[in-house]
Image: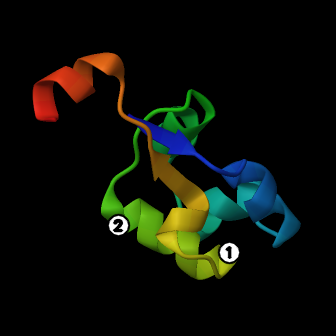
Amino acid sequence: MIKYNIDILAELKKRGYDSKRIKSTGLLSQATITNIKKGGNINTDTLNKICLVLRLEPSDVISVIPTDEEKIKYF
C-alpha cells in the first residue's frame, strides 16, 4: 500500500501552485487532484512531476507500507 509522506497539495501551494495554477499549467488533472485528496495511488509520471516541482525525491513523497494481505501474498 502506498502512503503519502507529505501533504502534496499543501506543499504545491507553498511553491505557488494553487488549484487554479495546477489546472492551468496542466501539472495535475482534476481526477488526479481528487485521487490525491482521497489518498489514492498516483502513476509514476505524476510522481515525477510532483518531485520536480517540489524538488524532492520519490521517497520524500511516498512510502510503501505493505498491508497484512500484501505481506501474505508477496512475502
| In this view, 25 is above or below 65 | below
* Kind of residue at badge 1: Leu
Mark 2 to mark 1 CA distance (whole Å): 14 Å
Q: What element carries label 1?
A: helix
Residue carrying label 2: 45
Q: Residue at x 18, y 22 (%)?
A: 72
Q: In which quarter of the image is residue 56?
A: bottom right
Task: Locate residue 75 relative to residue 54 in the image: left or right.
Answer: left
Q: Which residue is drawn at 32% across and 18% down?
A: 68
Task: Locate residue 44 relative to residue 29 in the image: left or right.
Answer: left
Q: Which of 50 and 74 is in front in this view?
A: 74
Task: Locate residue 52 relative to residue 72 in the image: left or right.
Answer: right
Residue carrying label 1: 54
Q: Can residue 59 be seen in this view?
A: yes
| Mark carried by residue 23 | none
* Kind of residue at badge 2: Asp
